[in-house]
Amino acid sequence: MDVKTAFVNGMVEQEVYIEQPQGFTVHESQSHVCKLKKALYGLKQAPRAWYARIDGFLKSLGFVKNIADSNLYFKVLNGFPVILILYIDDLFLTGNEKLIAGCKEELSKEFEMKDIGLMHYFLGLEVWQRDGEIFLNQGKYTVEILKRFRMMDCKSMATPMNSNLKLLYDDTSESFDPTVYRQVIRSLMYLVNTRPDNCFAVNALSQYMVEPRHVRWIPAKHVLRYLNGTIRYGLRYVSDRKMELLGYTDYDGARSAADRKSTSGCCFGLGSGMISWYCRKQTSVALNTAEAEYIAACGASKEAVWLRKMLTGLFDQELDVTVIHCDNQSCIKLSENPVDHDRSPVKSHRHQIPNIRDMLRKGAVKLQYISTEEHTTNIITKRLSKVKFEYFRDKLGVVENVSPH
Amino acid sequence: MCRIIDSEPSSFDEANELQVWKDAMMEEYQSIMKNDVWEIVPRSQGKSVVTSKWIYQIKHAADGNIEKYKATFVARGFSQKEGVDYDETFAPVARYTSIRTIIAIASVMGWKLH
């Protein structure tokens, strides 16, 4: 659903004056101005004023704001739940059908709403609701970028990246138009919202936004060529699964020849599909592999704690410990063994990182060994062969939309 | 009148010559009046006044046909000074991770998204 002229619903608390509208001046515009009672588009305080209004209204309906995300609301009535997600003037509801209908009615009484029934589209994400599954993709957007950069008729590729990453460091090759390069990378970044399989390639390429060169434009086009063959791909969430939060953490093995920094990667799944992932270059140079892996695991734990906070608020009960998979035994040992002496491989004080041991003690997260061959984050931290890439892409829950109509 | 107007005017003077845009502005003005957005007061000394502007947009339907001529009256908020004209700002946007989390929960629970 969306709220029509949402900002006009926000009350302005400060004294704000605005020029009378051209063509509709009531008094001489030199001598008279409009004193705002309600917010207008463009006004700095408009979004905040609108949020204050809708937040107050939702609370009056009995909704509770989630502690992890202040745009996520939750309500339980006679044991039945309803969840509301707010994005400026767009919102969606899920949960008990009767409660949803009631909520829609209350909202429509208070604000001028546009209700399109079941959700098909939200913030540029296409939502396909079918029996036993919800499918999420950005097929239309993918076609739009391929058209925009004239890559509709190109030959498709099986993976988003196959060139040696070392090629990207070449600072001697001819320079490339930064505007086009940045436009492509930014479009791809938005697409990663339903396509974690591109996460690694986009992260690698996005490090050269400042000074793109021809050697970097070729792999950028490669990602577009991969997309051309996978337009209908997206995230599939199927029903008959256990509601369990599972994490994976890894690092790339300090492949960045330029500064020897490692890249952390992690992903979290709930039910059948991934809900959170990232690939991020570490901010400091690790002295050894265990340390790099430990920094990555700390980042993953931080994300786990945030996700747990959100889920605890929604279910109103304590969660079981969240298992984060890791393929480095010494990192797991380090996280369990609270030694931090001179010869310990990890000097947590050297890095601005949260202490994973604290989270372990509190029973929030637990590192568990997984063999490298089965480690889902491989696709987020490494360049893979076609066979391996497709295997891990499946594990992410990224599949083709089988019946798009 | 059967000429199709397919360009968006950039100024009031340009828009004010065409009936569709005049109607669009009237519609927006009436909506503002109905919502009781402001009151007209005499200009007072020492108070800053935010400038305003009309924005004209053509809304297209999914099939590409023109659906609506929309005029929006906006405040040119960039002239407002922090601490003087406003204190705090905030945009109510949910994280995409939260959105996917709720969708994953809905799929496991067999809920529909509205």
Image (cartoon, coloured by chain):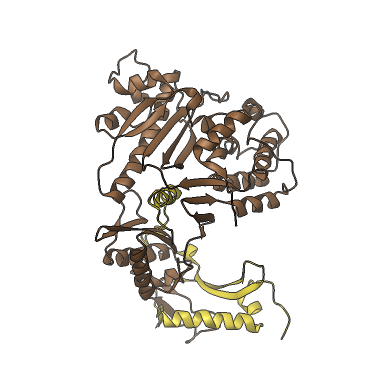
> What shade has chain A been given?
brown
Looking at the image, which residue sits at the far top?
A343
User: Image quadrant of residue A227?
Assistant: top right
Residue drawn at point x = 30 percent, y = 65 percent: A56
Residue closer to the observer: A331 or A10: A331
- Image coordinates of residue A230 in percent, x first then y, are 63, 44
Residue B16 in view of the camera: no
Quadrant containing the C terminus of chain A is bottom right
> What shade has chain B been given?
yellow
Tally of marks:
0
Residue closer to the observer: B48 or A289: A289
The answer to whether A160 is drawn above or below residue A314 in the figure is above
Q: Left or right: B74 with respect to A330?
A: right
Residue closer to the observer: A219 or B65: B65
Quadrant containing the N terminus of chain A is bottom left
- Image coordinates of residue A30 in percent, x first then y, are 49, 81
User: Image quadrant of residue A201?
Assistant: top right
The answer to whether A106 is drawn above or below residue A385 in the figure is below
Residue drawn at point x = 50 percent, y = 67 percent: B76
Residue B19 in view of the camera: yes
- Image coordinates of residue B91 in percent, x first then y, are 42, 58
The answer to whether A337 is drawn above or below residue A394 in the figure is above
